[in-house]
Amino acid sequence: MSTARAAAILLGKELRLEFRTRELLNATVVFAIVVVVLFSFAFNPTPDESRHYGPGLLWIAFLFSGSLMLHPSFARERSNDTLDALRMAPVSGFAILLGKMLANFIFLSLAEVVLVPVFAVLYDVSLAGIVGRLVLVLVLGSIGIIVTGTVFSAISAHARMRELLLPLLMLPILAPLLIAAVEATSALFSRRPYLDQTWAAFLAGFDIVFLTASWLLCDFLMEE
């Protein structure tokens, strides 16, 4: 079975499981909205302050949301030894990782679709004229969070303190990505919006490097 077909089958399984109950997606969206609302009331920013501090708060909410939904990514496969069955199937380890990454990316994207308009209203930030460029930055940043988080979720799935281990592994690696994402978003929220190509290229390079690394190391990552 090809990698693409195996990943598509696993993606379909993940989507069916989640949309059957929507427990993880609902919890993630509510949590992210609560974080943004609390920041809004805590800082009560002016329009100028929103343009300066808003991007950082927005990406913190995305990071928290991603961490919340990435933890069960491989932990749920421990029941009934599902992960062992997947590894015994005639598919590559990268197909398993890719299917999980695609599912997590869809879930995070859905959370962002809800969160960004709420953020724009609460922080009085206009999205007119920057939606396309903002989507590009969000996609590049989200891919980096998802690829890195899914890999570390696989690594920590069998650890005793996996709930604590996952964020400890993710945060140092994601620090450069978050800085680039915040800077690129700040440029879009400025009085004269523009796409900072340097930071956008950094985000794309980060995604390519870690996606390639996950492909090269997939067999090692899927080991016990």
Image (cartoon, grey):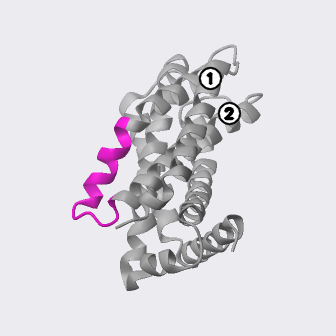
- For the residues labelled 1 and 2, say whether their Cβ atoms are less than 8 Å apart: no
- Residue 61 lies in what quarter of the image? top left
What residue is pinned by disc 2?
134
Kindly identify the residue that appears in the image at 67 percent across and 29 percent down.
Answer: 126
- What amino acid is found at the position of numbered circle 2 in the picture? Leu
Tally of marks: 2
Q: Which mark is residue 189?
A: 1
- What amino acid is found at the position of numbered circle 1 in the picture? Phe
**Left or right of 74: which side holds 25?**
right
Residue 101 in percent (x, y) is at 56, 57
**Left or right of 92: which side holds 43?**
left
Q: Is residue 45 above or below residue 158?
A: above
Which residues make up the magenta segment?
156-172
- Answer whether residue 201 is visible to the viewer in this image: yes
Kindly identify the residue that appears in the image at 37 percent across and 81 percent down.
Answer: 79
Residue closest to the far left = 160
Residue 75 in percent (x, y) is at 38, 69
Indicate which disc, 1 or 2, sits on the residue closer to the N terminus.
Answer: 2
Please tell me which residue lies in front, 79 or 1.
1
Kindly identify the residue that appears in the image at 47 percent across and 66 percent down.
Answer: 24
**Left or right of 44: which side holds 215?**
right
Q: Which mark is residue 141?
A: none
Query: In which quadrant will I find the N terminus?
Result: bottom right
Residue 200 in percent (x, y) is at 64, 27
Queried whether the magenta region covers residue 112, the answer comes back as no
Q: Is residue 72 above or below residue 197?
A: below
Residue closest to the far bottom = 80
Gap in Å between the C-alphas at discs 1 and 2?
9 Å
- Answer whether residue 196 is visible to the viewer in this image: no
Given this view, does label 1 or label 2 mark the residue nearer the observer? 2
Kindly identify the residue that appears in the image at 54 percent across and 42 percent down.
Answer: 144
